[in-house]
């Protein structure tokens, strides 16, 4: 990176993951990583977007694809990309086993030093990918700090499966976060509550001013005073992987200029269209607006 400060609407931070997806439909390899799913959303919406990532140079086609979308990539090339296997043993898309064979390592503060943004979205896969030093560096900037809980509650177990682990030090990190995204399983791990409406309220007590929580049927948003809900309404469910990554990116991209309730509906609609196909969203703003008119009219 140069020493020049670069300004964006949204900066998304996370390792690229080479995902091997195994289900009844067969086995296929998909370009994953929350930053990848999120950048496709932000680019679709016309936001000035940057991607900070780590990956093997052999996978640089992902970087090239982002450039074609209009995203500014800031990659660090490592000895290996993060290699993830997603196994769906049943037709229930929320029943999956995640295995990590290798990782591209951890980010460092210097990777974000020259970047300014209205919002920074931390979208890591496992604990340790984005250390607290990086989060402090982001908090010192003017933009909102947004984080996906998965990158802090998940660790790589002895069998290489991703497992949930008690998050020691969560109070410090969550005190630095403005908007927290979690799914219903992570929410229960962190709060002990099963009801998503109770989960978001308890998560807000840790410090974040807004909570975005996803579950199989939609999302719940809590802005500190009001609750908002919006359902997912895909015509067919093919692309479960990247659901949460797409949802939080869509929410924040919209939230920069809209209310929490409006952003919740927008995120639900974008995520619904994404889930109709595998991989990042390749739809248009017009299609999102049409879906909202048809399926989300008050």
Image: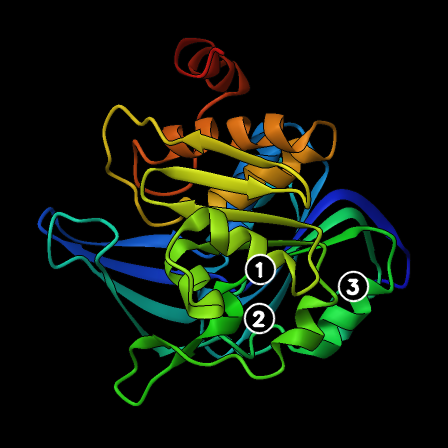
Can residue 257 be seen by looking at this rendering?
yes
Residue 158 falls left or right of residue 24? right
- Name the one closer to the observer, 200 or 181: 200
282 relative to 9, above or below = above
Residue 251 falls in which quadrant of the image? top right
- How many badges with numbers are in the image? 3
Point out residue 15 in the picture as x, y percentages from the top left corner: 52, 65
- Name the one closer to the observer, 161 or 177: 177
Q: Secondary structure at mark 3?
A: helix
Give the residue drawn at x 63%, y 82%: 169
Mark 1 or 3, nearer chain start? 3
Mark 1 or 2, nearer chain start? 2
Mark 3 or 2, nearer chain start? 2
Give the residue drawn at x 10%, y 54%: 90
- Distance between the Cα atoms at labels 1 and 2? 35 Å
Point out residue 134 in the picture as x, y percentages from the top left corner: 73, 72
Residues packed near mark 1 inside 10 Å, few (<14), some (14 to 19) or many (20 plus):
many
Residues packed near mark 3 inside 10 Å, few (<14), some (14 to 19) or many (20 plus):
many
The residue identified by callout 1 is 203
Residue 251 falls left or right of residue 29? right
The residue identified by callout 3 is 138
Can residue 68 be seen by looking at this rendering?
no
Point out residue 261 in the picture as x, y percentages from the top left corner: 60, 29
Point out residue 228 in the picture as x, y percentages from the top left corner: 54, 33
Residues packed near mark 2 inside 10 Å, few (<14), some (14 to 19) or many (20 plus):
some
Q: Secondary structure at mark 1?
A: helix
Give the residue drawn at x 37%, y 60%: 185
**Marking on residue 77:** 2
């Amino acid at each position: 990176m140069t020493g020049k400060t670069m300004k964006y609407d949204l900066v998304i931070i996370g390792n690229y993951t080479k995902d091997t997806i195994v289900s009844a439909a067969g086995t296929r390899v998909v370009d994953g990583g929350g930053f990848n799913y999120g950048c496709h959303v932000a680019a679709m919406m016309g936001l000035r977007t940057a991607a900070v990532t780590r990956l093997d140079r052999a996978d640089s086609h992902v970087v090239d694809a982002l450039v074609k979308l209009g995203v500014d990539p800031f990659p660090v090339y490592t000895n290996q990309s993060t290699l993830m296997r997603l196994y769906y043993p049943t037709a229930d898309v929320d029943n999956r086993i995640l295995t990590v064979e290798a990782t591209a390592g951890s980010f460092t503060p210097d990777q974000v030093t020259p970047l300014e943004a209205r919002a920074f979205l931390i979208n890591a896969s496992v604990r340790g990918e984005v250390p607290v030093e990086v989060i402090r560096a982001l908090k010192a900037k003017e933009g909102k700090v947004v984080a996906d809980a998965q990158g802090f509650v998940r660790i790589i177990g002895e069998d290489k499966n991703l497992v949930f682990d008690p998050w020691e030090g969560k109070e410090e990190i969550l005190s630095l976060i403005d908007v927290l995204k979690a799914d219903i399983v992570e929410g229960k791990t962190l709060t002990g509550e099963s009801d998503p409406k109770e989960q978001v309220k308890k998560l807000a007590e840790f410090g974040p001013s807004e909570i975005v929580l996803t579950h199989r049927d939609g999302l719940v948003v809590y802005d500190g005073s009001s609750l908002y809900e919006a359902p997912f309404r895909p015509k067919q469910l093919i692309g479960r992987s990247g659901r949460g990554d797409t949802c939080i990116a869509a929410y924040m991209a919209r939230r920069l200029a809209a209310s929490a309730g409006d952003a919740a509906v927008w995120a639900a609609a974008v995520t619904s269209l994404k889930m109709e196909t595998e991989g990042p969203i390749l739809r248009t703003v017009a299609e999102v607006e049409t879906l909202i008119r048809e399926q989300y009219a008050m």
